[in-house]
Every structure is written in structure tokens, then in C-alpha cells.
Amino acid sequence: MSLLKRYEKGEYKYASYSKVRNWIITLVMYALSAAIYTIGYVTTGSNRNLLTIVAILGVLPASKSLIGAIMSSRVKVLNESMYAKIEDNIASLHGLYNLYLTSYEINFYLAHCVITKDSLIAFTTDKDFDNKRFDEHIKKHMKIEGIQDILIKVFDNEDAYINRLTQLSNSDQSVQPNEKLVNLLKNISV
């Protein structure tokens, strides 16, 4: 994985890339604030100077970045063998990997999902995944975005999911994904 190559949310390597990138940015921001404070203290012999204020204000965006780093660290990554199976069976379907959707009460991990014009088919490795609450959560957001008549099905069995991918890739639904739903999933995930 290269930090110089950018990955988009939903790509397989995005979760790993995002973790490393967010932690590096956070550490650099805290180090910068610490360096500014140290320079001010060394040059004036006191912490009562303008650079101390700048350093304290620099901790605010660093703390916000820390929250993002912690959240990105919670995202699991789909194992390589399942990734290979999905890639072998996805054909022209539009899929997203490693989505971690947050809500006030519960979080939802989708290892992979496929979006067609009228369905959202997903796979999770989370044994505590609550389908009912996920349906409520995603339908609430879909209603806000004006997305209607979408079938939602989440699988926790690898073979059943691969079979469904094969069925979908052989149908006419594989041509055009619901772009509004794709954007919604990217926007509400970490």
C-alpha cells in the first residue's frame, strides 16, 4: 500500500489507507503544535507569549483529526480470500468495500455491498449485525435523499452472498447502479 496513491471510499484498499493516513496527519498536527509551543517557550523563557496561544489553537484541529483517526481504526478490512471470491463473481456490478456506517445508537459494518438500480445487497462479517436496525437507519437516510423502492438484503454467509452476486451479474440489473444510493452510502460511512 502506497501513501502516495489515493484510494476512494468504497475501494478495497481505502480502509487500510485511511487508517495510516489519518494517524500520520494527526501525529504531524500534534507535533507541530508541540514545536510551536517549544519555540515560544525557548525564545521567551515563559509560556506567556503569542506562540503559546497559537499552539493551543493548533491542538483543536489536531483533536478533531484524532477522532477521525480513531474512527477509521475501527473499520475492519475484508480478508483477501473473500475479496478474491467477490472479484471473481462481481462482473459489471457496482460494489463498495469496507463501509462502516455510524448512528447514534449502533454502528454497522458492511464488508462489501452491491448497488443496483433497485437493490442494495450487502455482506457483513459482524456477528452482532442488527438487520432490523440497519434497515431503519438506511431507510431513514434514503427517505431524506428521496430514494425509494430499494430492496435491502444483508448476508452474513459467504456462500449465499457469492451465489447472489452470481445471480445479479447474470441479470440486467448489473448495468446501472443507483448513483444516489452509492453517494449516500459513501457519505454516511467513515
Image (cartoon, rainbow, N blue to C red):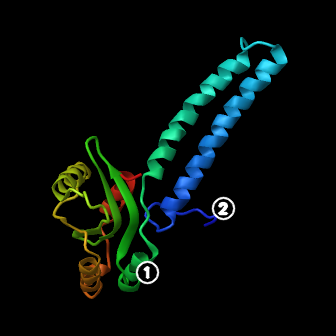
The answer to whether residue 159 is left or right of residue 60 is left
Q: What residue type is disc 1 on? A: Ala
Question: Which image quadrant for residue 157?
Answer: bottom left
The image shows residue 25 at horizontal and vertical percentages of 61, 45
Which residue in the protein does label 2 denote? 4
The earlier-in-sequence mark between 1 and 2 is 2
Between 94 and 134, the one lying in front of the other is: 134
Q: What residue type is disc 2 on? A: Leu
Q: Is residue 183 above or below residue 166?
A: above
Which residue in the protein does label 1 denote? 84
Instruction: Indicate the secondary structure of the residue bearing disc 1.
Output: helix
Q: Pointer 1 and pointer 2: residues touching (CB < 8 Å)?
A: no
Instruction: Indicate the secondary structure of the residue bearing disc 2.
Output: loop
The image shows residue 8 at horizontal and vertical percentages of 50, 62
Residue placed at 28% from the left, 68% from the top?
A: 122
Select label 1 or label 2 by which is in front. Answer: 1
